[in-house]
Image (cartoon, rainbow, N blue to C red):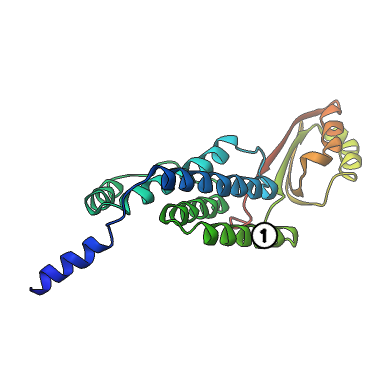
Amino acid sequence: MDMLDLLKRAISAEFTNTITLDGLLLSLVSAFVIALFIVFIYKKTFSGVAYSKSFALLIVMVTMVTAIVIRTISSNLALSLGMVGALSIVRFRTAVKDPIDTGFIFWSIASGIMTGVGVYIIALITSFALGTLFFISYLFGFSSGGKYLLILRYRPDVGNEVAEVLKGAPKHQLRSKQIQQTRVDCTYDIDYSEKKDRWLERLKSIEGVESVSVVSYHQDFGS
């Protein structure tokens, strides 16, 4: 027996497990439960302008699909090689808006891999630990959540009213101000929260305020 035969036997030994319905269902259920926990953490720590339900569904889908793929290819060498070839031609064209979303995608893929190979307890423990630590980091302000741009346009004669309303706004700092004969354009850095936006409604109700915009941004760029 030469080295090539030994190598073939060693590789084949790793792919002798057969796919069973019980094992597949267990992987799917475990992946689904972990995916729901990941979505829960994502929703609790989300700090953008509008919560994306489609991204939350994507997390669930990626976790479960990864579990199915790993469960399938772990029992067949030919399938595993074919899957590697298929993945090599896939192109991801959708840009990720928030870098933290990439982390959640990797988390869901890792969870899918662990449930796919059958290490359910490890998958549950590591996901719970990771989610707990991330949530604690979020509560202690390690994330950059809550930073927005407040863009105002109003007539010069209502400047005092605008300034009075802004006194009741969350912490903010003037970034730029352009004064023209017929209008004033201001941009502020502000810690905006949808739960405390009554001041925003008051600002919009001022006659002479032409536009009010709140835009999410990342401080990594031009802060």
* x 69%, y 62%: residue: 137
Q: In the image, what residue occupies the spot 61% across and 56% down?
A: 222
Mark 1 — residue? Answer: 132
- Crowd band around label 1 with a 10 angstrom C-alpha radius: few (<14), some (14–19), many (20+): few
Q: Is residue 4 left or right of residue 216?
A: left
Q: In the rendered view, does 219 fall on the left or right side of 101?
A: right
> Can residue 172 be seen?
yes
Across and down, in percent, residue 121 comes to 54, 59
Of residues 13 and 217, the one nearer the viewer is: 13
Picture residue at 62% right of the left edge, 62% below the top: 129
* Residue that protrudes farthest toward the left in the picture: 1
Look at label 1 and name its amino acid: Thr
Is 186 placed above or below 206 here?
below
Image coordinates for residue 3, horizontal then vertical, percent: 11, 74
Q: Position of residue 180 (x, y in %)?
A: 74, 37
Q: Which corner quadrant holds the C terminus?
A: bottom right
Judge whether 206 appears above or below 169 on screen: above
Instruction: From the viewer's side, name the closer residue of 25 and 37.
Output: 25
> Quadrant location of the N terminus?
bottom left
Q: Is residue 168 left or right of residue 211?
A: right
In this rendering, does residue 95 appear at all? no
